[in-house]
Structure formats: C-alpha cells, structure tokens
Image (cartoon, grey):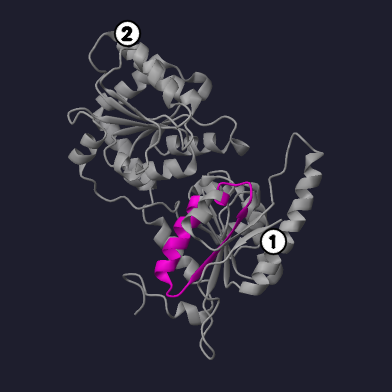
C-alpha cells in the first residue's frame, strides 16, 4: 500500500495561462539523503516563482516521519534496499521495486513534472527510473566521496550530476563524467552568531576553546567511549582542564550513560553533555574544533564554517564511504582521520591538545576547510536546476548577481 499526501495547492494555473512548474525530489532512507533534498527544494522554491515541489520517498525511511511533519506534498512507496547477506529476501525487494515503480509512474503522469532531482539512497531509484522512461530531465546530487549504487546507475542518464567531493567523479561511469559539477552539499549557510550568548546558553567558559563532539542525530557509542576515555585521561593528569572544553552531543539513547560516566569522574566542569543539539549552527559558530563521524552532511558543515575536525569514520558505512570522505579531507589538510579501532582516550586527548596548541597548523586547517567548503551550495545548485526547467519557466527566474547582460 502506498501513502500519498496532497496539499491544498493547485496542480496548475487557470485556463490560458502557463501550468505551474512541478519539480520532484526523491532520495532518503536516511537523513544524509533526505535533508539535501529538502534544502534544494527550499532554495529552488525561492529561485522559481510559483514552483510546486513533490517528494517521493520510502515508507521505511526517515522521510516517512519528516515529510508529513513539514507539510510537504509527497508519495511514500515500499521500496527498500537490496540485502547483500539475505538473498531470498531480495525477492520481496524486487517485488516492492515493481510496485513502487508503478505508483511513481501514476503520480508522474498526473503531475507532469518538468524536472526530477534524485539525492541518492534506495528511495530515489523508482523516481529516477520513471524519469528516464518518460524522458523527464533528471539531475542528481551526491553527498559522498563514493557515489552510491543509485547515483552510479542513474548517472548514465542524468543531465547534471552535482557532487560534493571532487573524488566522486572518478568513481562514476566514464561517460557520465562530463556532466559532473563540483557543487558542494546543500546546507544552511553559516551566519554570525552571538558568541557570548551561545556560550552562556550552553554554560561554557568564554576563556576556553570549544571542541564540538557530534556523532550524528542518534549519537555514536564508539565515539562516546573514545571521548569518555579522553576525559578520563585528562582527569588522571590532574590539571583543572586540558586547555579546552567539550560541547558533547551524545545522542538521545546515550546521554544517560555519558552522564553516569562523568559522575564517576567527578563531573568535570569543562565537559557539557547534551542529548541532541537542536540548533547546530549556533554550536558550529562557537566551535574551534570538531570530533565527529565522517558523514557527508556533517563534514560539509565543518568545511563551510572553517572548522578543523578529527574524523572517526563509521567502519560499517556502505562502500566504506565515510572512510573515503575522511581520507579526502585529511589529504586536503582540513581534517585528521582516526580509524575506529585506533581510537583511544589518551591518544584522542593528545591529538586535540597538540592541534589546539599549534596555532599555525590550526589556522592552516581552517583555511583548507574553507577552501573545500561551499556554504552557498544550495543556492548555486538550485540556479543550475532552474536552467533545466522548460524555457518559459527559466524566463521567470531572477538572475544571480553578475549574470545576464
């Protein structure tokens, strides 16, 4: 059974006027694919007057909760990823792919989109396939250094492929590479924060640099254990603080365990654990360094803000893409990579202290991060997408500064 939601907005203009342009965004399963789609849809709606956006996602994905909450018109289908270790289960996967394809085909025939944008993940497959069948312009946005299966397959038919990592181009089919644009990941652009107010909000010391620890929306047990080990090592050294303070997003399911561990260590005043940071830009605005997994969207935010990072890739990530994300940023001079099996408290503590004590190296890493960062990626990609729409729609798109005659 498919889940479809319609909003009150009409499907077209009145008799004799041009139809309202429709753009489909599809991608999800995880926030790393969904949130870029949401960011691009918002940017494109600002660029194109009267645009309608429509989302296609998976019933089992994060989008099944986020899209209804945000009020977006959408279709949820039973598509799911292939199971590498359970071959018999793939019979159901193939059947659900066929059901999803037909549901998306019906939706497209009704809405007649002028463009389909796929941001990766298994949820984007049916929409991409239907776009190819109906000869609807198709664009892709790939967040990681290693393109996923959906991106690699659809890239052969896409008009444009927007990537965040230059390294991603080398891992696409050769015939698709001339359509690759290095555009960055669509994130909320950095804006100045009231540093004293944010420090007070998190009860932080204004005299100490802030190390932001972020293991993703659900947190990371391995990362938390490594950071706890670093706190214990600093406590054992006997100083009041190690030269910095920690703002620690533990993840909702881990916060009680972290709190208990800190209590055993005497509740160090320089550590501030929180279950989740709702307004991450405020935290990014006060961070001197970050310790994080190497997901594409998190690393894109660090780059945009010019924040050096210590990255601990998730070893079970599909196609080992987090390790390759981290390796690319380490090679660019913007990050240091520590493999999860090599993460230990004293080593992490020493790494952070050495970096924060070396002003020249820290500034060089900040510069390298900013060089790789693309804080206006959402707006720039949206302008490129607008140029793929029908000519009568393109004529209504305002020119960017410096464009046009």
Residue 165 is one of the magenta-drawn residues: no
Magenta part of the protein: which range? 35-64
Position of residue 278 relative to residue 391, above or below, is: above
Residue 126 visible in this rendered orientation of the protein: yes
Residue at (53% x, 34% y) in the render? 323
Give yes or no for residue 58 being in the magenta stretch: yes
Q: Quadrant of residue 85?
A: top right
Residue visible at 29% across and 43% down in the picture: 282
Residue under circle 2? 236
Q: Secondary structure at mark 2?
A: helix
Residue 91: image location, x then y, percent: 81, 45
Q: Position of residue 394 (x, y in %)?
A: 47, 77
Picture layout, residue 264 above or below residue 190: above
Percent position (x, y) of residue 46? 40, 67
Q: Quadrant of residue 111?
A: bottom right
Which quadrant: the N terminus? Answer: bottom right
State the mark number for residue 129.
1
Q: Of marks 2 and 1, which one's residue comes earlier in the chain?
A: 1
Q: Position of residue 298 (x, y in %)?
A: 43, 41
Decide: few, some or many residues near mark 2? Use Cα within 10 Å; few <14, some 14-19, many ≥20: few
- Residue at 67%, 73% in the rendered image: 109
**Any part of residue 227 in sight:** no
In the image, is 86 to the left or to the right of 404?
Answer: right
């Amino acid at each position: 059974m498919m889940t479809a939601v319609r909003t009150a907005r009409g499907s077209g203009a009145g008799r004799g006027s041009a139809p309202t342009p429709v753009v489909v965004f599809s991608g999800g399963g995880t926030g790393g694919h969904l949130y870029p789609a949401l960011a691009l849809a918002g940017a494109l709606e600002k660029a194109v007057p009267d645009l309608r956006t429509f989302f296609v996602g998976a019933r089992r994905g994060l989008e099944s909760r986020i899209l209804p909450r945000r009020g977006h018109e959408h279709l949820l289908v039973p598509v799911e990823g292939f199971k590498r270790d359970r071959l018999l289960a793939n019979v159901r996967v193939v059947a659900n792919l066929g059901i999803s394809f037909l549901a998306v085909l019906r939706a497209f025939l009704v809405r007649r989109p002028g463009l389909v944008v796929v941001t990766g993940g298994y949820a984007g497959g049916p929409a991409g396939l239907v776009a190819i069948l109906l000869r609807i312009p198709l664009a892709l946005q790939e967040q990681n250094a290693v393109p996923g299966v959906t991106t690699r397959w659809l890239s052969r038919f896409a008009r444009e492929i927007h990537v965040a990592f230059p390294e991603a181009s080398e891992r696409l089919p050769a015939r698709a590479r001339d359509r690759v644009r290095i555009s960055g990941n669509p994130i909320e652009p950095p804006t100045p924060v009231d540093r004293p107010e944010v420090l007070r909000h998190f009860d932080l010391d204004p005299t100490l640099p802030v190390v932001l620890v972020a293991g993703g929306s659900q947190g990371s047990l391995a990362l938390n254990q490594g950071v706890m080990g670093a706190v214990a090592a600093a406590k054992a050294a006997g100083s009041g603080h190690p030269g910095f303070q920690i703002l620690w997003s533990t993840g909702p399911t881990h916060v009680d365990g972290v709190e208990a561990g800190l209590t055993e260590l005497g509740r160090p005043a320089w550590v501030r654990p929180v279950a989740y940071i709702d307004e991450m830009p405020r935290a990014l605005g006060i961070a001197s360094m970050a310790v994080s997994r190497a997901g594409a969207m998190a690393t894109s935010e660090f780059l945009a803000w010019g924040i050096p990072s210590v990255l601990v890739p998730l070893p079970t990530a599909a196609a080992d893409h987090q390790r390759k994300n981290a390796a690319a940023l380490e090679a660019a001079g913007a990050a240091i990579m520590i493999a999860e099996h090599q993460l230990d408290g004293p080593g992490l503590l020493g790494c952070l202290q050495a970096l924060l004590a070396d002003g020249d190296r820290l500034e060089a890493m900040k510069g390298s991060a900013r060089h790789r960062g693309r804080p206006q990626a959402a707006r720039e990609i949206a302008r490129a997408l607008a140029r793929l729409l029908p000519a009568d729609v393109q004529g209504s798109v305002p020119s960017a500064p410096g464009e046009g005659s």
